[in-house]
Image: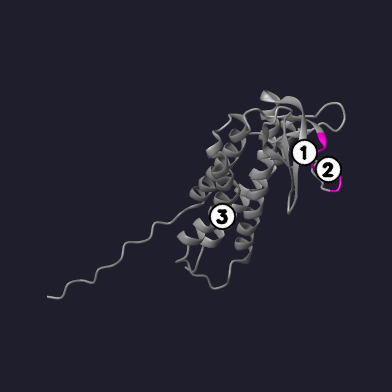
């Protein structure tokens, strides 16, 4: 007697709520990591991996995870709008990580910042202008300063009055006038707007790609 042909179990469909939660979790993780790295602050050996995770790994995950999970879905026509939404979410997530880090830096300086007269040791005029600074007693200020390090205006030996973080977590800021204006709350609108854009675009893109041929 012939055995009935075995049928493969139906694929479990990933619905809109699953994709909404996935994108929301990615955004929340990125914001939390980039905020707490300078504010907490996290140990020095964790700050590099945290930045890479938030500014590179999580943005790529927003595109690669649906790409892998939905690779079996076939379409009569390429869902250009859905793919475009996922493409939008990628750079938006990178910008979100950078802006959140700037807000976290300012909050860290609010909590622990100290003023000092620093000496410029080195100026790197690469893709991002950076200055290596040392305090009067010879201690290097970490991380390197990126704000106000135009090589046409700053050179080794110059003295700058800067606000720096003794913990080395928040980036130093130069005193251009009489006081550095720290306002981490000013970033709330940008962070919230980018977060909403990523969640909406990511969810819409994932749902659109998951709707294949019937």
Quarter-wise, where is residue 136 in the image?
A: top right
- 24 left or right of 91 in image: left
> Which quarter of the rendered picture does the N terminus lie within?
bottom left
Mark 2 Cα-neighbour bin, 10 Å: few <14, some 14–19, many ≥20: some
Question: How far across and how far down the image is residue 44, in percent?
Answer: 56, 36
Q: Nearer the viewer, residue 56 or 41?
A: 41
Residue bearing the label numbered 3? 60
Mark 1 Cα-neighbour bin, 10 Å: few <14, some 14–19, many ≥20: many
Could you tell me how far apart the alpha carbons at marks 1 and 2 are, in whole angstroms?
8 Å
Q: Which residues are magenta?
A: 152-159
Question: How far across and how far down the image is residue 156, in percent?
Answer: 79, 42
Residue bearing the label numbered 2? 154
Q: Secondary structure at mark 3?
A: helix
Look at the picture and state if 93 lies above or below 102: below
- Give the mark nearer the N terminus: 3 vs 2: 3
Q: Secondary structure at mark 2?
A: loop
Residue bearing the label numbered 1? 120
Mark 3 Cα-neighbour bin, 10 Å: few <14, some 14–19, many ≥20: some
Look at the picture and state if 125 lies above or below 103: below
Could you tell me how far apart the alpha carbons at marks 3 and 1 are, in whole angstroms?
37 Å
> What residue appears at the point 60 percent right and 61 percent down from the top-left corner?
82
Q: Nearer the viewer, residue 73 or 57?
A: 57
**Majority SS type along the magenta span:** loop
> What residue appears at the point 59 percent right and 66 percent down from the top-left corner?
79
Q: Secondary structure at mark 1?
A: strand
| Circles 3, 2 touching at the beta carbon (< 8 Å) | no
Could you tell me how far apart the alpha carbons at marks 3 and 2 are, in whole angstroms?
36 Å
| Circles 1, 2 touching at the beta carbon (< 8 Å) | yes
């Amino acid at each position: 007697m012939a055995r009935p042909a075995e049928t493969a179990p139906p694929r479990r469909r990933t619905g809109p709520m699953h994709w909404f939660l996935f994108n929301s979790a990615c955004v929340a993780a990125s914001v939390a990591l980039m905020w707490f790295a300078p504010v907490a602050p996290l140990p020095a050996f964790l700050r590099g991996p945290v930045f890479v995770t938030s500014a590179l790994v999580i943005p790529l995950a927003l595109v690669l995870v649906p790409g892998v999970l939905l690779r079996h879905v076939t379409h009569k026509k390429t869902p250009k709008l859905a793919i475009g939404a996922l493409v939008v979410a990628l750079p938006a997530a990178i910008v979100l990580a950078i802006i959140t880090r700037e807000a976290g830096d300012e909050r860290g300086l609010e909590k622990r910042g100290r003023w000092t007269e620093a000496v410029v040791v080195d100026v790197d005029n690469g893709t991002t202008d950076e200055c290596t600074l040392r305090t009067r007693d010879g201690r290097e200020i970490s991380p390197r300063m990126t704000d106000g390090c135009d090589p046409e205006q700053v050179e080794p030996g110059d003295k700058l009055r800067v606000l720096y973080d003794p913990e080395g977590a928040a980036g130093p800021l130069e005193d251009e006038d009489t006081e550095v204006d720290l306002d981490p709350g000013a970033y709330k609108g940008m962070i919230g707007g980018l977060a909403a854009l990523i969640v909406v675009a990511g969810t819409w893109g994932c749902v659109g790609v998951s709707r294949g041929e019937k």
